[in-house]
Amino acid sequence: MNKYFYSLGLMSGTSMDGIDASIIKSDGEQNVEIIDDIYLKYDDQLRLELKNTIDSCLSKDDLKKSSNKIKDIEKKITLNHAQISKLIIEKNKNIKVDVIGFHGQTILHRPENGYSIQIGDSRLLAELTNTNVISNFRENDILNGGQGAPLAPIYHQVILKKIKLKNPSAIINIGGISNITYMNENEEINSFDMGPGNHLIDEWIKINTKMDFDKDGLIATKGQINEKILNEFLSNAFFKKKTPKSLDVRDFSLKNLHKLNITDGSATLSMLTVKSIGISINTLKNYPKTILISGGGRKNKFIIDNLKKILKCKINLIDEFSFNGDFIESQAFAYLAIRSYLNKFITFPNTTGVSKPCLGGNLFKS
């Protein structure tokens, strides 16, 4: 009989708005029970510091020059992760969490140069929570020729098998970047980053309004798409790359949008997300019968309505199948932590381009 573990997954994504935390119970295989999910928002000052730090770090040399600033923000981030960990553990004190899966905050993703850097002090988190922590999930994959991303596909596969959709089927996560996990008729998975998700839209909204994002896509709905600028985005070399492939949020920028008003810029960037997904779907060998959408972008009505117009398949929000689309990634890192703890593979040639199925994660004991 397989042994079950309680695992707490922590995820702070490219939106840099806060931390998602999830507790699951699993054997690291197909058996997964979701216990709880909660969210902690970063305060405005921390978000600003984090954004400024990330914007200033374009290479490893930049990281060295900013090492003192990065250590300071790393500690603040870790304290926030400890805070949310204690909150969800206290809320579920009837169980004992065996391990924490700590993704950390990505500040530079450059797999083509052999690295992907996440900040977060795993030793401090283990000490503060008195719980074993597993982190650094990407490094071993990159050392073995992979992209180090996306990492959630092995968990997406569990979800797709549980829901029992007719294959081929897929999960598309629209976070800061959009990525897909595609499952074929034989339940084998392929995965890759598809293009910009919410990140550029959110940046545009923050620059032009006092809001953090385009709630429900209402601003985009009022705008006109600038086809010239959209086509410039779509001519990016990323779209011609073979899969598996991955993105850093800075691989695309807002530099071409300065002449647009708020609504037209939002409409153009939102359509970029839609078209990026459409282009990617058209590269698949067989068209999915059903696509489930997770991540913050699933709440953007402009994006979802336009995806339904251009994709020739059924599209559902993952929430329609009793999974909370806000917490799929944090649940995934809880699941990956269990697999890492049990020395099970977490990345595969068809998910990250790694040369062979790969272990990942480092254990920090409490």
Image (cartoon, grey):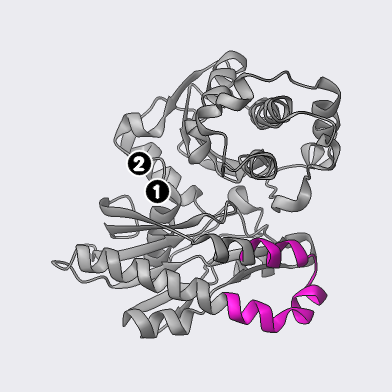
List the residue tagged with mark 1.
Answer: 327
List the residue tagged with mark 2.
Answer: 324
84 lies above or below 268 = below
In the image shown, does 295 or 153 lie closer to the viewer?
295
Q: Residue furthest left?
A: 94
* In the image: residue 175, left or right of residue 165: right
Residue at image coords 57%, 61%: 47
Q: Position of residue 57 (x, y in %)?
A: 76, 67
For numbered disc 1, what is the local secondary structure? Answer: loop
* In the image: residue 58, left or right of residue 345: right
* In the image: residue 157, left or right of residue 111: left
Q: Position of residue 180 (x, y in %)?
A: 57, 39
In the image shown, does 305 or 156 lie closer to the viewer?
305
Start-end of magenta stretch = 50-73
Predominant secondary structure, magenta span: helix
75 lies above or below 55 = below
Q: Residue furthest front?
A: 210
Residue at image coords 63%, 19%: 222
In the image shown, does 24 or 306 lie closer to the viewer?
306
Residue 52 highlighted magenta (yes or no):
yes
Residue at image coords 42%, 67%: 101
56 lies above or below 174 = below
Marks 2 and 1: in contact by CB < 8 Å?
A: yes
Q: Which mark is residue 294?
A: none
Give the image quarter of residue 317: top left
Three-letter amino acid code at the position of disc 1: Phe
Q: Position of residue 221 (x, y in %)?
A: 60, 20
Give the image quarter of residue 210: top right
Mark-to-mark CA distance, 1 and 2:
6 Å
Residue 318 highlighted magenta (yes or no):
no
Three-letter amino acid code at the position of disc 2: Asn
For numbered disc 2, what is the local secondary structure? Answer: loop
